[in-house]
Structure formats: C-alpha cells, structure tokens
Amino acid sequence: MYSIGELRPGMVIIVDGDPYVIAAAQHSKQARQGGVCKTKIKNLLTGSMVNKSFQGNDKLEPADVTYGKAQFLYSDGEAFNFMDNESFEQFALDNETIGDQANYLVDGTDVDIQYFEGKPISVMIPPKMDLEVTHTDPGVKGDTASGGSKPATLETGYVLQVPLFINIGEKIRVNTQSGEYVERAN
C-alpha cells in the first residue's frame, strides 16, 4: 500500500477498482491539518483523465500491471489481433483501444503490451516505424530536400506529408507520436 507521501508521476494505482497511472502529483500540508496530495490520473482502461485529491491517511493499492512483448498479426476491421511472444496465445484488442496507433501497425510488428490482472489493456508501439510508400505523386527533376512537400499514402493507408523527392516503393521512417515524416529508411 502507498501512502499519499509516496505518490509520484508514473506510478500505477488502483482507484475504485480500475488501474490509473499518475500523470502529476502535488503534495501540500497546512498548519494543523493533514497532508493533501492533488493528482491528475489517467484511467488505463478508458484513457480518461481525472483530477483527484487524496487526504492524509489514505492508503492506495498498487495496480497489478505487467508488460510483455507481442506481435501484431492482422486486423479484421473490428479488432486488432496479436500473439504473445512468450506463451504464443492470441488475443484481440478493439479499435478504440488501439486508436491512432492503427496508422502504423503492419503485420509482423513487435509491440509492447500492458496487462492488468493478466488481461491485455493497451499497446505501445515503437516511437519510430519504417513504412513503405504505396502512393504519391511522382517527383519532378530539380526537386530538392528543402523544396516543399506532397501527400503520400503508406502501406497502412495513413496519409502524411513527405518531401518531394520521395517516390512510390520507398521506405520512410515515421514518428509515431507526431505522425510526421522523419527520414528515408535504409
């Protein structure tokens, strides 16, 4: 059990039966009153952010959150299917859980999975991914690296802006947090 004095950003706790990660914690104490910890916490099941205050003697239970590796297998339109790299068990996560990360998932991609009480609850993809360009307008002779940008469709169907010299069939590195082109991939 954690006391309110031990709460720090990044810790995972149980609040009302759900796992929450602490995004921010501010401790304060006034003269004769007990301490107070004002926190901003994120529900790991729903993704919602909540402001919550904990009082002096409150004890908080650490969440049983573990991490593992899995491989993305395929999407059937309703869910994304993965295989645990250790047990080889297959499981599915719905579109809402995957969210914008779907723009970067290619069959065979290794991802980190977050488990709560043995059930997968979220996916963490690498910060940069190499993806193939499947459609873009052809580059024109004289186009340079600093000469502007054009839209390109990736193998996942995601569309982003790339430099004019990028052509169909090339692999590019994409920042998965911002969704922007980084560089050509080798």
Image (cartoon, grey):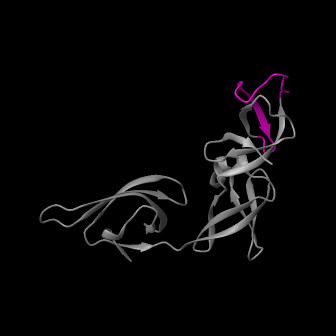
Residue 179 appears left or right of 46: right
Q: Observer-nearest residue: 19 or 138?
A: 138
Write down the region rendered in magenta: 137-157
| Residue drawn at the location 70% of the way across and 25% of the way down | 148
| Residue drawn at the location 72% of the way across and 48% of the way down | 104
Q: Would you say residue 147 sits in the magenta stretch?
A: yes
Residue 152 appears left or right of 27: right
| Residue drawn at the location 70% of the way across and 61% of the way down | 111
Q: Observer-nearest residue: 93 or 106?
A: 106
Q: Position of residue 83 (x, y in %)?
A: 76, 67
Instruction: Decide whether the magenta segment is chiefly helix, strand or loop.
Output: loop
Q: Observer-nearest residue: 64 or 79?
A: 64
Q: State which quarter of the image contains the N terminus.
A: bottom left
Residue 141 figure quarter: top right
Q: Position of residue 163 (x, y in %)?
A: 74, 31
Q: Position of residue 114 (x, y in %)?
A: 61, 66
Q: Would you say residue 154 sits in the magenta stretch?
A: yes
Q: Position of residue 151 (x, y in %)?
A: 75, 30
Q: Is residue 119 above or below residue 177?
A: below
Q: Is residue 48 above or below residue 140?
A: below
Q: Is residue 25 above or below residue 144?
A: below
State the count of labels: 0
Residue 164 appears left or right of 66: right
